[in-house]
Image (cartoon, rainbow, N blue to C red):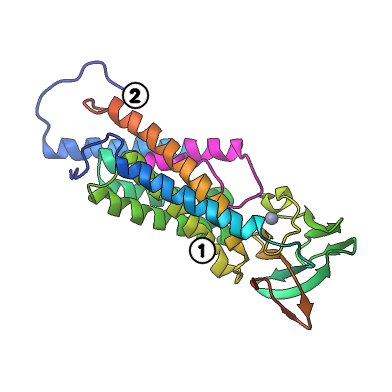
Amino acid sequence: MKHPKHKKSPLTKSKNAAKTAALMGVLVAVAFVLSYVEMVLHFSVGIPGVKLGLCHIVTLFALYRIGPKAAIFTCFVRIGLNAWLFGNAMILAYSAAGAILSLAVMLLLYRLPLFSPVGVSLAGGISHNVGQILCAAIMMETAGLVWYLPILLVSGCLSGVLVGLISGWLLRRFEHRHIL
Amino acid sequence: MTAPNTDRKLKKNDIILLAVVLGVAAVLFVSIWLLAPKGEVAVVTVDGEEFGAYDLLKDQEILLPEGHKLVIENGEARMVYAPCRDQICVHHIPVSRKGETIVCLPYRVVVTVSSRYRRGFYEASEA
Ligand SMILES: [Zn+2]
C-alpha cells in the first residue's frame, strides 16, 4: 500500500480530492475485509453486542487522517455492510443505533482537546455498546437487558482500547506518507 | 483538513475515563448480578407481548411460536434450539438469578427470570 518514493511536487486541489476519494475506496475495502474477518472469527459469548469492533479501526483512522466527513462516510458504509451480512431488520436497527451514537460521541470528543485517539476510541466503544443495548431494550420492550450492561461496558473498554492502539499505530506509521 | 487533535500521545484523561467506566461496570456487576437472589419463574415475551411464565423448579421443555425451544432443568433455563442465524441465544449461559435475561434479537424473543408470577403480572424489576 505504501510507495517507497513519491514526488514532492505540490498537488493541485483536484488531485488531492482524487487522492482522498481513492483513500476512502481503500478504507471501504478494508472495512469489508474486517467485517468478514470478524464474522468468521465470531467468538460468541452468548451476549448480543460483544464484538471485537475491528471495523472501528477504519472509522477512527478516517477521522484522524482525513476528517469527520470521511469518518461519517465509512461508518455508514459499515452499517450497510451489516445490513448485507445479516439482512435482519432488528440486527440492522440494533447495530445502526450503536454505530451512530458511537460516531457522534467520537466526533464530539475529537473536537475537544481532552483525549488521545485511544480515549476517543474508548468512549466510542462504550457508547457503541450502550447505544445498541438501549435500542434493543426499546425495540424488545424490556428493561431486562440492563442485565447485560456490566459485560457490555467492559467489552466496550477492551474493544475501544484495542482499536485505539491499533489505529494510533497505523496513524503514526502513515503520518508523513502518502498511502496511495 | 481539520485536525484539532494533533497530539496523539496517551493522556491522563484517557486513563481517568477508563477507570470511571470500569468502576461503574464493577458497581453494576455487584448490584445486578452478585446480589440478585435466585428467581422462581422464567417469563417469556415475544414481540413485546407476554407469552407465558414457567416455574423454574419444575423441569420442562417449552416450544415457542417461532420454533425456539426453551428447557428448564435444575432451576435453570436455557435456550436449546433457535432458528436465528447468530445463535447468540443458544450460546447464552443458563439463567437462574432474578433479572437474568436471554434474548433472541432477530426474533424479538426475551426470556427473563423473575421472582414471582401472579395472574399475568410479573415483577422482574422489583428490588
Ligand atoms: Zn437467537
Residue name at image x 35 percent, y 55 percent: A105
Q: Secondary structure at mark 1?
A: helix
Which sits in the foreground, B98 or A55?
B98
Question: Where on the image, by quarter, is ligand 1?
Answer: bottom right
Residue name at image x 90 percent, y 64 percent: B58
Question: Residue B35: in sight, yes or no?
Answer: yes
Residue B124, horizontal then vertical, whole percent: 68, 71
**1 vs 2, front mark:** 1
Residue indicated by mark 2: A1
Residue indicated by mark 1: A134
Residue name at image x 46 percent, y 56 percent: A98
Q: Can residue A74 be found in the magenta stretch? A: no
Which sits in the foreground, A70 or B12?
B12
Which sits in the foreground, B51 or A2?
B51
Cα separation between marks 1 and 2: 39 Å
Q: From what the image shows, is residue A4 above or below residue A131?
A: above
Please report the bounds of the magenta region as a residue range.
A33-59
Q: Amino acid at mark 2?
A: Met
Q: Chain of mark 2?
A: A
In the rendered structure, the answer to whether residue B114 lies left or right of residue A29 reads: right
Question: Residue A49: in sight, yes or no?
Answer: no
Classify 10 Å Cα crowding around label 1: few (below 14), some (14-19), many (20 and above): some
Q: Chain of mark 1?
A: A
Which sits in the foreground, A177 or A159?
A159
Q: Can residue A45 be found in the magenta stretch? A: yes
Q: Amino acid at mark 1?
A: Leu
The answer to whether tags 1 and 2 share a subunit is: yes
Residue B27, horizontal then vertical, whole percent: 53, 55
- Position of the C terminus of chain A, as image quadrant, is top left
